[in-house]
């Protein structure tokens, strides 16, 4: 189902790169610590980044019960191009999926479209309107937090990667296969 659409002044590949930037999750999204993420190519040609996110306020797609205690959420993102990522949150057998498409627009900006997919059949019954609304709302909040950074990002600077940027470097190498993204 449609989630939301917004415009941001950053090239599209930076929106998708976000799932590889492990260092941004704690300061930008308020996670307890830097997530433990791994990157690997898939047999179908996508690039996969996966791991666990430690969160303070659990939602239904996270492990644990709501109530303010720390929770760990399974995180898996499949990147199909510099413009498309499907991010899974929740258990592997019943993931909720946030699909993000970033379409290049004029002068280094892009249009971001976010779509939500939830399992049709789950052990505890179909997703409720409240659960879907929570997923859309949480996704919108995360993108609003990211947009503050994107709107002030100087993309003309040559990147100076550090030791912790191996996931971003893997993503940028993946983008090079598409020729135009950079």
Image: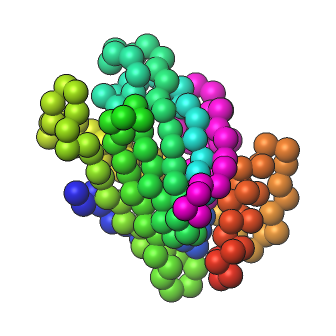
Question: Can I make out residue 27 in this image?
Answer: no
Above or below — where is 23 with respect to 20? above
Question: Which span is picked out in magenta?
Answer: 16-45
Q: Tell which of 114 and 94 is nearer to you.
A: 94
Q: Name the image quarter holding the C terminus.
A: bottom right
Q: Give residue 163's quadrant in the image.
A: top right
- Residue at 20 percent across and 44 percent down: it is 120
| Image position, residue 145 (x, y; %) | 48, 48
Q: Tell which of 121 and 144 is nearer to you.
A: 121
Q: Name the image quarter holding the N terminus.
A: bottom left
- Residue at 27 percent across and 45 percent down: it is 118
- Residue at 24 percent across and 60 percent down: it is 2
Residue 148 among magenta residues: no
Q: Tell which of 9 and 16 is nearer to you.
A: 16
| Image position, residue 150 (x, y; %) | 57, 61
| Image position, residue 177 (x, y; %) | 69, 74
């Amino acid at each position: 189902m449609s989630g939301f659409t917004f415009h941001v002044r950053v090239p599209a590949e930076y929106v998708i790169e976000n799932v590889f930037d492990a260092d941004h999750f704690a300061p930008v999204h308020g996670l307890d610590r830097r997530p433990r993420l791994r990157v690997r190519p898939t047999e179908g040609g996508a690039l996969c980044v996966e791991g666990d996110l430690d969160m303070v306020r659990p939602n239904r797609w996270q492990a644990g019960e709501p109530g303010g205690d720390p929770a760990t959420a399974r995180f898996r993102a499949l990147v199909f191009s510099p413009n498309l990522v499907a991010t899974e949150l929740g258990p592997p057998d019943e993931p909720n999926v946030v699909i993000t498409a970033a379409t290049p627009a004029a002068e280094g900006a892009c249009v971001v479209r976010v779509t939500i997919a939830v399992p049709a059949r789950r052990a505890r019954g179909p997703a409720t309107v409240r659960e879907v609304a929570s997923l859309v709302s949480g996704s919108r909040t995360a993108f609003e937090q990211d947009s503050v950074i994107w709107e002030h990002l100087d993309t003309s600077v040559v990147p100076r990667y550090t030791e912790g940027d191996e996931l971003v470097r893997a993503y940028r190498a993946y983008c090079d296969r598409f020729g135009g993204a950079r």
